[in-house]
């Protein structure tokens, strides 16, 4: 019997936590600049990061087998809360996403970002893989119900992330490529239908994405200003606190969804390369954990979590640099705000749990 | 379980998932490269283009807040003013040492710990080049001392701002309301671009309900800024459009007379011009100083207002709910004539009490020995309770509810200051819904004298009195008469809605009820005859007493034995002159005892003031 390493005893995965701390540190530094040097904002964000890391470490102490046992309950609870939001939710900025339970307000859709990949992994790990058509149908239903409930709030960004999280698990589980291609075709043909159900502001975002110049002072303003910020950064950037786009307040949402543009402006392409490398370190360490997970459930869930994280990054950077329409997806561990950060940290806590609570199996 | 896992671990599934993961890792790498190459293209290849754009990006748009409209009474008294106030502000970036600057400033003017605390709080939130107030509302002396010494303090400036001020705060607070700093709640409803640069918003009363008119339209200036974000020159300017002044129907001298007449007692007075529903006076006593709320009230003062047993924050005129007592009688009397339940000369025997058939419970009249044979005129003049017990019994609760609804009881009046209570006009359905119990006959009887479940606000009762004065034409009470544009001088009249006529249309019946109410004041045996003595005009009225506590079946109500807070509320409703009504009012004095003694003399004073200019004739 091999002696336990420090990592297994503490249930912490050092490469991942190191990567996360580096990204959070970059986030605080850039937030100080993006918020026009408001110390309060940075302090509060640091406290949020601290709380989220503690939650991650706590979740990592729970054995993966226990997490697995509670998957269906968590999912059902999430669905119930989503229904509650639709009937009793608070309306903020034209969308009904928040549930107020006296002490705190939270978005039940956040729970689904974890509950959906968990329950899909739980379900598929009990079936033969690659999944037969019936199993596939059930899995897709599991994903589609919450995605639909979130999309009508309306919160397209979160709906997209939940769909991606669930979809990632299905793809890893070995869905046949032909079926995958068929789904892609089906989704593409549904696009006009989706357009019909979209809110005006959502339609405007899509149109703006196609041609930002047509409305330079209205909806296209975000993208134009964001591109100016990125493009004027050059190879080494203008230097910390010297970004004119952000300091002069030309860049909207510069502390939250568009914070990456501030980063690009001040730290240039070299900064971007560094940040992307740290992100890739976290992602590939996640893949390593998934690859070596002992049980099918662990493999599926771990890959689902890592891929969700990746989707966050790719969608946020894609939208800030004008390659994707503007959907409200934050840059993980960097954008101001605590809600999605806590969810992601808990996800990584589960990842650590999968890796460090290993059972001894007969070889 | 373990067996199954170990079997599956060795199976093809394991290999399948691993193959997929490698495949996905390749896709991930591919997407990252795609993304990076796009950013490379923007940042490196097109760098020059975007650098030029960013250098030309020097034009900013700054909001210029509009000046808030003023509020005047109908007799031209300014009720809400803007006055310039000076505050001492510090720009952290331009000061060498913020702490030392504050310390040195403290030697010139007093800077409290509270001020410093507030300054520190803002320091964390604002940008280094924003101006942050350290002391507000400087007086003349402070301004001059600071001006002389200003050269010693780089980054310190005296800034003039317009502040809202209510010169007659306590007397008009329940009408005008006040403005306060924009908070989170306000932000969620208002149009942020319209309010960029504005710091205050109407929170209550006229200030709130006419916010759109008073606020005005925000202006903008396009400025060129340097790389540090400071304004170099103004390129273009769209001036703000000042808010319009609001002229009220309120007669301030009458308002003041009403405040004086209440002598600081708890109560409310509402006076309405019956012809068009213009509110001439609306007092809720005690009032409070709205100026405290403009820049945020300190918590000690707020707590003392909240905890005061007199509840000064409550607008009794529109939100206070009281049983109407005997003031309900003229309304029910009229309905009984119209609904053919009583004829003018039908008489009821009043022995001093009334009982339902088969019950021993005695419903008492206020006059122990009884009124003898009473007809409708006598029953209103003398406020005979037994007559109205009997009338209510014959009418039944359904028709009572219907009749009272005609006069607007149980519904909001639609006055233009938002918050008002609808009172309560009880019915069988209401009781079943609220208590789950059926309606009892005894409850119908006490409804006949305005007790029991029925509740009304002083505003509702004043409006209903105006309907009496109008012989049935209903009104919507309103406070604003016109908006006045201070720049162009143009005035816009406020549209007042029309509520039509009650369904009671027989003018003979109206005359009979009004005559009875005139007899209340001018008749030999009227309950308010002392208030009518020697008046230069004739007026119609009705006294009322609203019970605060129930009296046991055999107990005597001895006013002197009862502590102040359990004394009855005194009511008086009236309008004058009878021939051509100019003013209708409702007066409530909490714990004032009987209506004839406390409330009716106030009506006389106000009528004298309004109709004869204070000359009682």
Image (cartoon, coloured by chain):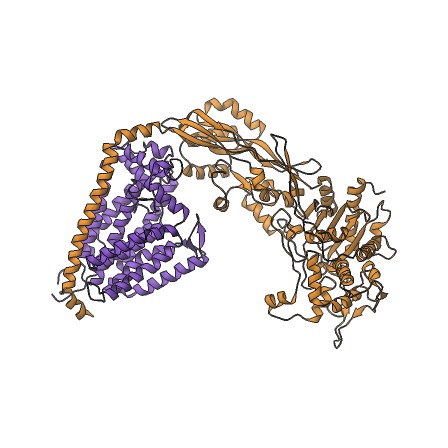
Chain colours: A purple, B orange
What residue is rendered at 29% in x and 52% in y?
A188
The answer to which of B583 and B153 lies nearer the viewer is: B583
The answer to which of B510 and B574 lies nearer the viewer is: B510
Q: Position of residue B154 (x, y in %)?
A: 44, 25
- The reply, left or right, for residue B413 in relation to residue B10 is right
Question: Image quadrant for the C terminus of chain A?
Answer: bottom left
- The reply, left or right, for residue B227 in relation to residue B141 is left
Q: Position of residue A244 (x, y in %)?
A: 34, 31
Residue B206, located in which quarter of the rendered image?
A: top right
Question: Image quadrant for the N terminus of chain A?
Answer: bottom left
Asked if residue B438 is positioned above or below residue A305 in the image, the reply reads: below
Res. B30 visible in picture = yes
- Looking at the rendered structure, the number of numbered marks drawn on it comes to 0
Asked if residue B464 is positioned above or below residue B245 in the image, the reply reads: below
Q: Position of residue B502 (x, y in %)?
A: 72, 56
Q: Residue furthest left?
A: A363
Res. A35 visible in picture = no
What residue is rendered at 77% in x and 42% in y?
B610
What residue is rendered at 69% in x and 64% in y?
B452
Residue B520, located in which quarter of the rendered image?
A: bottom right
Asked if residue B601 is positioned above or below residue A229 in the image, the reply reads: below
Q: Residue furthest right?
A: B524
Q: Position of residue B319 (x, y in %)?
A: 64, 53
Residue A115, located in which quarter of the rendered image?
A: bottom left
Q: Residue furthest bottom?
A: B358
């Amino acid at each position: 019997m091999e002696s336990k390493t420090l990592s297994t005893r503490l249930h912490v995965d050092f490469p991942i936590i190191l990567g996360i701390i580096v990204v959070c540190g970059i986030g605080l530094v850039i937030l100080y600049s993006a918020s026009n040097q408001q110390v309060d904002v940075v302090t509060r964000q640091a406290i949020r990061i601290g709380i989220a890391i503690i939650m991650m470490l706590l979740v990592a102490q729970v054995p993966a087998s226990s997490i697995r046992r509670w998957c269906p309950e968590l999912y059902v609870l999430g669905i119930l809360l989503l229904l509650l939001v639709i009937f009793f939710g608070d309306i903020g900025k034209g969308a009904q996403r928040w549930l107020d339970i006296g002490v705190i307000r939270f978005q039940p859709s956040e729970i689904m970002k974890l509950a959906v990949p968990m329950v899909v992994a739980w379900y598929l790990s009990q079936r033969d893989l690659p999944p037969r058509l019936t199993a596939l149908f059930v899995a897709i239903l599991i994903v589609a119900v919450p995605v639909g409930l979130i999309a009508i709030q309306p919160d397209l960004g979160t709906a997209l992330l939940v769909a991606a999280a669930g979809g990632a698990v299905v793809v890893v589980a070995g869905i046949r490529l032909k079926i995958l291609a068929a789904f892609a075709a089906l989704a593409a043909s549904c696009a006009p239908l989706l357009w019909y159900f979209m809110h005006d502001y959502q339609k405007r975002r899509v149109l703006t994405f196609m041609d930002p110049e047509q409305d330079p002072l209205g909806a296209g303003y975000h993208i134009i200003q964001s591109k100016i910020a990125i493009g004027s950064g050059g190879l080494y950037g203008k230097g910390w606190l010297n970004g004119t786009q952000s300091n002069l307040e030309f860049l909207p949402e510069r502390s939250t969804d568009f914070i990456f543009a501030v980063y690009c402006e001040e730290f240039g392409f070299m900064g971007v390369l560094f940040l992307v490398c740290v992100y890739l370190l976290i992602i590939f360490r996640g893949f390593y954990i998934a690859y070596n997970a002992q049980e099918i459930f662990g493999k599926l869930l771990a890959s689902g979590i890592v891929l969700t994280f990746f989707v966050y990054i790719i969608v946020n950077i894609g939208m800030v640099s004008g390659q994707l329409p503007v959907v409200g997806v934050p840059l993980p561990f960097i954008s101001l705000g605590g809600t999605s950060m806590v969810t992601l940290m808990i996800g990584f806590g589960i990842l650590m749990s999968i890796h460090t609570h290993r059972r001894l199996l007969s070889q | 379980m373990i067996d199954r896992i170990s079997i599956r671990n060795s199976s093809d599934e394991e290999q399948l998932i691993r193959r997929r993961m490698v495949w996905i890792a390749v896709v991930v790498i591919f997407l990252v490269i795609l993304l990076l190459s796009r950013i490379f293209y923007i940042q490196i290849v097109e760098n020059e283009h975007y650098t030029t754009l960013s250098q030309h990006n020097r034009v900013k748009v700054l909001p210029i807040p509009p000046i808030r409209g003023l509020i005047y009474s109908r007799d031209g008294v300014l009720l809400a003013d803007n006055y310039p106030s000076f505050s001492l502000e510090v720009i952290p970036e331009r000061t060498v040492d913020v702490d030392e600057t504050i310390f040195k400033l403290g030697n010139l003017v007093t800077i409290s710990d509270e001020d410093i605390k507030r300054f520190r709080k803002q320091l964390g939130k604002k940008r280094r080049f924003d101006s942050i107030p350290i002391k507000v509302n400087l007086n003349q002396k402070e301004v001059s001392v600071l001006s002389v010494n200003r050269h010693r303090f780089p980054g310190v400036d005296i800034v003039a701002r317009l502040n809202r001020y209510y010169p007659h705060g306590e007397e008009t607070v329940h009408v005008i309301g006040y403005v306060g700093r924009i908070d989170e709640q306000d932000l969620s409803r208002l149009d942020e671009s319209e309010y960029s640069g504005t710091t205050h918003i109407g929170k209550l009363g006229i200030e709130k309900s006419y916010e759109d008119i008073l606020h005005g339209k925000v202006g903008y200036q396009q400025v060129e800024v340097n790389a540090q974000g400071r304004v170099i020159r103004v390129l273009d300017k769209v001036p703000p459009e000042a808010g319009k002044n609001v002229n009220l129907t309120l007669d301030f001298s009458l308002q003041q007379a009403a405040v004086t007449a209440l002598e600081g007692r708890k109560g409310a007075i509402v006076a309405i011009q019956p012809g068009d529903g213009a509110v001439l006076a609306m007092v809720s006593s005690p009032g409070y100083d709205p100026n405290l709320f403009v820049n945020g009230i300190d918590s000690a003062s707020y707590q003392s207002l909240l905890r005061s047993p007199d509840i000064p924050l409550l607008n009794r005129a529109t939100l206070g709910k009281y049983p109407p007592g005997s003031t309900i009688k003229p309304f029910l009397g009229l309905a009984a004539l119209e609904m053919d339940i009583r004829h003018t000369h039908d008489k009821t025997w009043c022995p001093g009490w009334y009982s339902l058939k088969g019950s021993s419970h005695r419903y008492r009249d206020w006059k122990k020995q009884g009124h003898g044979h009473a007809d409708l005129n006598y029953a209103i003049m003398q406020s005979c309770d037994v007559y109205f017990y009997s009338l209510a019994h014959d009418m039944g609760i359904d028709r009572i509810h219907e009749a009272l609804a005609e006069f607007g009881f149980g519904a909001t009046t639609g006055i233009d200051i938002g918050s008002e209570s609808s009172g309560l006009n009880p019915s069988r359905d209401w009781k079943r819904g609220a208590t789950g119990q059926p309606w009892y006959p005894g409850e119908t009887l006490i409804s006949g004298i305005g007790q029991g479940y029925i509740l009304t606000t002083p505003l509702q009762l004043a409006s209903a009195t105006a309907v009496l004065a109008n012989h049935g034409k209903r009104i919507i009470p309103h406070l604003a008469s016109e908006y006045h544009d201070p720049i162009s001088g143009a005035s816009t009249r406020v549209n007042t809605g029309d509520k039509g006529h009650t369904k009671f249309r027989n003018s003979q019946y109206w005359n009979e009820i009004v005559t009875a109410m005139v007899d209340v004041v001018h008749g030999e045996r009227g309950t308010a005859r002392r208030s009518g003595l020697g008046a230069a005009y004739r007026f119609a009225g009705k006294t009322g007493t609203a019970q605060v506590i129930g009296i046991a079946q055999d107990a005597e109500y001895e006013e002197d034995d009862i502590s102040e807070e359990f004394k009855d509320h005194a009511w008086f409703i009236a309008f004058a002159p009878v021939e051509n009504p100019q003013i209708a009012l409702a007066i409530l004095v909490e714990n004032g005892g009987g209506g004839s003694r406390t409330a009716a003399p106030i009506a006389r004073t106000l009528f004298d003031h309004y109709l004869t200019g204070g000359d009682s004739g």
